[in-house]
Image: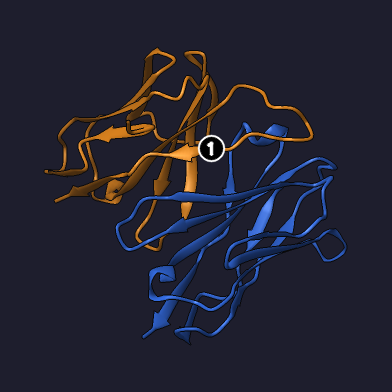
Amino acid sequence: DTAVSQTPKYLVTQMGNDKSIKCEQNLGHDTMYWYKQDSKKFLKIMFSYNNKELIINETVPNRFSPKSPDKAHLNLHINSLELGDSAVYFCASSQDRGSVRQGVTQYFGPGTRLLVL
Amino acid sequence: AQKVTQAQTEISVVEKEDVTLDCVYETRDTTYYLFWYKQPPSGELVFLIRRNSFDEQNEISGRYSWNFQKSTSSFNFTITASQVVDSAVYFCALSDNFGNEKLTFGTGTRLTIIP
């Protein structure tokens, strides 16, 4: 009964290749995210989708393209992989709107460790 | 712009000691949300706590406690009687809009508990 799952867990590939990472959540959440964690452990948002619509795109190269076929899935496709793309990519999800007093929580998947050679 | 500062890059303590992880934040929003996440050596990100800006009540959960002080823009995390399983990187994060948009993370504090 995994809440947020990602595949694959590890991805080793050559520079220039195209690869995809898949994310699925079974929490019934409306909003999904992609975060990148670099080698220094710094976490930064890349994209956010709400009900299949893009709501956040944080100055990410065009080689990264998120796709949300339905609100339970948010995939990340990366074209022409570069050495600098090596990182851990985390998917997360949250409820649509909480109350102001409560707020909402983002729950993270296990991460996908991408290594570009 | 939002910013979260975790000035302690690494902390090592001997098992059973208490340890406090500091978090200082900056935001111009009047309503915001603060979070702590744990990243154990296995790599996943585990949610620990959410606190909204209205509620300055401190919280205790077992050996964990959190001290939110709006006056100093701090949201510190204390582990009492630390255990080896507490060894991890701990991230403080900030968000507005109910927490439903991007989380701004601090750079993390690597905590090592020495047996």
Q: Note the chain letter of the blue one.
A: B
The subunit carrying tag 1 is A
Task: Name the foreground residue: A16 vs A41.
Answer: A41
At horizontal 57% and vertical 25% (from top left) the residue drawn is A95
Quarter that holds the N terminus of chain A = top left
Rendered location of residue A115, percent (x, y)? 20, 50
Looking at the image, residue A108 sits to the left or right of residue A110; the answer is right
Residue B59, above or below A78 = below
Task: Name the foreground residue: A102 vs A67.
Answer: A102
Residue B63, above or below A116 = below
Amino acid type, mark 1: Gln
Residue A24, above or below A83 = above
Looking at the image, residue B68 sits to the left or right of residue B112; the answer is right
For label 1, the SS is loop
Q: Note the chain letter of the orange one.
A: A
Looking at the image, residue A19 sits to the left or right of residue A28; the answer is left
Rendered location of residue B8, percent (x, y)? 57, 76
Colour basis: by chain
Q: Which residue is mark 1?
A: A106
Looking at the image, residue B19 sits to the left or right of residue A24; the answer is right
At horizontal 40% and vertical 34% (from top left) the residue drawn is A61
Rendered location of residue A68, percent (x, y)? 39, 16
> For the image shown, how many numbered marks are present on the structure?
1
Rendered location of residue B47, percent (x, y)? 51, 48
At horizontal 40% and vertical 63% (from top left) the residue drawn is A40
At horizontal 73% and vertical 35% (from top left) the residue drawn is A102
Mark 1 is surrounded, within 10 Å at the Cα level, by few (under 14), some (14 to 19) or many (20 or more) other residues, namely many
